[in-house]
Amino acid sequence: MRIRISDDFDLQKIADSGQCFRWERMGNLWRIPHRGRCLRIESAGDAFRLACTEEEYTDFWRDYFDLSESYERIRARIDPGADPFLFAASESGKGIRILRQDPWETLITFILSQNKNIPAIRRSVRLLAEACGDKRRDAAGESYFAFPGPEAILSIGTEGLAACAMGYRAKYVLSAARAALEGRFCPEELMKMDGKSAMEALTALYGVGKKVASCISLFGLHHLNAFPRDVWIQRVLEREYPDGYPYEAYSPYNGVYQQYMFAYIRNGAAVS
DNA sequence: AGGCAGGCTTTTA
DNA sequence: TAAAAGCCTGCC
């Protein structure tokens, strides 16, 4: 099917934004795995061609891409005169969206992200999916791996996880899988919680601190006000907002603005 | 209580 | 060799 998307929607910028690590680009075509499916999507002039039915798009992929939200409107809340830095970042990051990713996959992915750069995260997540994910075929018959659930992850054991280049993070992944399988932790339950309760439930997990919990809240629970503070953001806040970042004024979209700033500084924007 | 130092696996530049 | 979308433990 073909669709036109008038709101912000740039696949490359989303893929580079550090929220998802399993998208694959082959020329103009993207393969995007999500909840046991894998979409083939390519830009076609001023529209996009998706290898799925209209119903599947409406019921599944539209939600994943968060297309009922207007990111143009979220950007328009920024006052260029009052906050030129965030405005410049949002102009540069125009096209970024916050995906509605699977909470479990987001949890494991961001446990793995600590002390790794993006290529290393991609590699580790790919190895994990290949090691114990379900092998399936997309609409073109090309194979991909679904993201493994807790049971599949436990089935390959410590050695299997170590082979996925997880290093010391393997024990965190193992612990989360056990907690999920034994019912002490339920990723889907998180979706029903408010921001604070979700953060508490996440940081209670072994190996999950505030930074990773914020990422999971933003990218896996769609709490758009979650505000991950990594070393980059911390640095930029100190330089650009010496009198304090106006967090309250930017509620409830702080997470979106954080993504613009993150992409902006990572792309080499002058920070001084 | 809250802050700080050191350690941790591996990859990347 | 240092740094990388950090967290845990022990110590004060």
Image (cartoon, coloured by chain):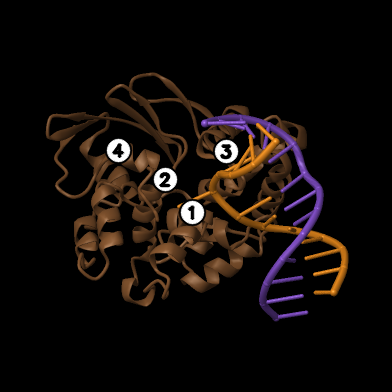
Chain colours: A brown, B purple, C orange
Judge the density around disc 4: few (<14), some (14-19), many (≥20) Cα neighbours within 10 Å.
some
The residue positioned 53% from the left and 67% from the top of the image is A198
Judge the density around disc 1: few (<14), some (14-19), many (≥20) Cα neighbours within 10 Å.
few
Q: Nearer the viewer, mark 3 or mark 1?
A: 1
- Which residue is the site of mark 3? A148
The residue positioned 62% from the left and 64% from the top of the image is A203
Q: Nearer the viewer, mark 4 or mark 1?
A: 1
Q: Mark 2 or mark 4, which has the lower sequence index?
A: 4
Q: Mark 3 or mark 2, which has the lower sequence index?
A: 3
x, y percentage for residue A217?
48, 60
The residue positioned 70% from the left and 40% from the top of the image is A154
Looking at the figure, which quarter contains the N terminus of chain A? top left
Cα–Cα gap, marks 4 and 1: 23 Å
Q: Mark 2 or mark 1, which has the lower sequence index?
A: 1
- Which residue is the site of mark 1? A232
The extreme front residue here reads A272
x, y percentage for residue A15?
38, 39
Numbered label attached to residue A128: none
Q: Amino acid at mark 3?
A: Pro
Image marks 4 and 3: residues in contact by CB distance under 8 Å = no
Cα–Cα gap, marks 3 and 1: 31 Å
- Which residue is the site of mark 4? A11
